[in-house]
Amino acid sequence: MTTIHSTALVDPQAQLDSSVSVGPYTVIGPNVKVAAGTTIGAHCVIEGHTTIGRDNRIFQFNSLGAIPQDKKYAGEPGELVIGDRNTIREFCTFNIGTPGGGGVTRLGNDNWMMAYVHLAHDCLVGNNTTFANNSQLAGHVTVDDWVILGGFTVVHQFVRIGAHSMTAMCSLLFADLPPFVMCQGQPAEARSMNFEGLRRRGFSPERIAAVKAMHKALYREDLPLDTAQTQIAGLSEKYPESVPDVQMMLSFLQQTTPQRGIVR
């Protein structure tokens, strides 16, 4: 049976699976849905149209599903959707989406959110990411799979962060961070590629060689971005195993606007 502490306030209309547990003094609103195996700690507030998947571990003192910190917001419908097997540590704040950004703030599967992480309205976070303490995302930020954000990383609104990239502690992102890139600074500058992370994820030597070649084209040869993209496109023939990696990089770069640019 659902284990709900006697001091928790769970609205009768909330939909909690029978295996969900809820800690002391937690408040859960009427439009909340929680799937099997999820545990919710003490003193949490989960409100709004919030859907939480299976086997999540939500620690104490979290605020999930509150309205956006957006002066334009006027009570329009929005959602927070959290996938499966996420760990959400203390004092995280995840807001619902807005009509101007698709209406949904989304966290995927198997993510590790450390204390004081903020996901503003309309953020889209993929799978297998790690956000260290005090990582802060402004509105409309997109974070792809396997990203690692160092502690106190701050991301400007509408910035995109590519898969397998990584930020150092206290990084400040105003521009898009391409896949595989490691950055550091205020504002952030590219330092290298996340080679060790790729090895740990099973990337072959050929795929890593292709990533090194992409790094050279983007950061070592002082090329305009369009010229670097042409050079990167040619890597598919030299490194056949890297075709998906090359296509991912090209797709990311093609979506970068001149006004935003990429971390250099």
Image: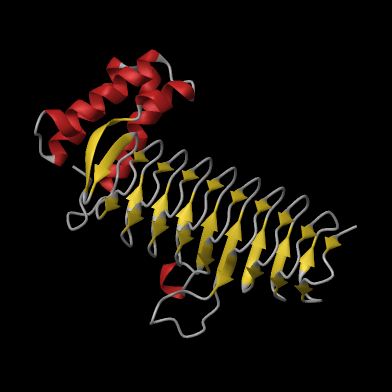
Q: In this rendering, would 250 be left or right of 50?
A: left
Q: In this rendering, would 243 be left or right of 221?
A: right
- 52 to 75, vertically: above or below: above
Q: Which quadrant, please, contains the N terminus?
A: bottom right
* Residue 236 seen in render: no
Furthest residue in direction bottom, as rendered: 74
- 70 to 219, vertically: above or below: below
Furthest residue in direction right, as rendered: 1
Q: Nearer the viewer, residue 164 or 103?
A: 164
Q: Where is residue 29? Give x, y as percent.
A: 70, 75
Q: Which quadrant, please, contains the C terminus?
A: top left
Residue 15 in which image quadrant: bottom right
* Residue 118 seen in render: yes
Residue 154 in which image quadrant: bottom left
* Residue positioned 23% across, 29% down in the render: 215
* Residue positioned 15% across, 40% down in the render: 226
